[in-house]
Amino acid sequence: MIRNYRDHAANERTYLAWIRTAITVMTLGFLVEKFDLFLSTLAYAVRFQSPVPLEHRRSEYVSMMLVALGIVIILLSTYRYFRTRRELEGEEMLTFRGLLSSFS
């Protein structure tokens, strides 16, 4: 039997929840970009105008920021998972340090 199994399982569930959140944020970034391309193509087809040049589209920056945020969430949650796992396997009794100090 694994020592502190419930704590390890809770740590893994929390980690997987953060990974799902990161994937959702990254997917939102891709959807913002696809929707902007769709609107640009639709405007071109309806009004027979030239599409908006890529350097003038702000949604591209928003979508890149969302993908970058998803990557940062994955990195931070991975760090927190392994740190918590190491603490759970240790022998010493740990106290709650607060939410903001969990990444320091």
Image (cartoon, rainbow, N blue to C red):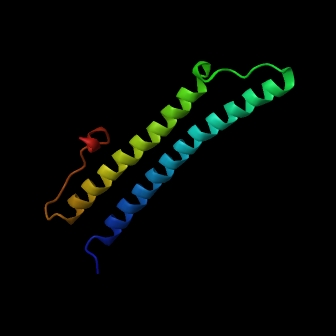
Q: Position of residue 41 (x, y in %)?
A: 76, 30
Above or below 16: residue 71? above
The residue depicted at 63 percent of the width and 35 percent of the height is 32
The residue depicted at 13 percent of the width and 61 percent of the height is 92
Q: Residue furthest right?
A: 46
Q: Residue furthest bottom?
A: 1
Number of numbered labels in the structure image: 0
The residue depicted at 16 percent of the width and 63 percent of the height is 90
- Quarter of the image where one finds residue 2: bottom left
Q: Position of residue 39 (x, y in %)?
A: 74, 29
The answer to which of 51 and 19 lies nearer the viewer is 51
Q: Position of residue 91 (x, y in %)?
A: 14, 65
Task: Say left or right for 52 vs 15.
Answer: right
Q: Residue furthest left?
A: 92
Question: In the rendered view of the protein, which quadrant contains the C terminus?
Answer: top left
The residue depicted at 22 percent of the width and 60 percent of the height is 86
Above or below 21: residue 11? below
Question: In the rendered view of the protein, which quadrant contains the N terminus?
Answer: bottom left
The answer to which of 19 and 104 lies nearer the viewer is 19
Q: Position of residue 57 (x, y in %)?
A: 61, 22
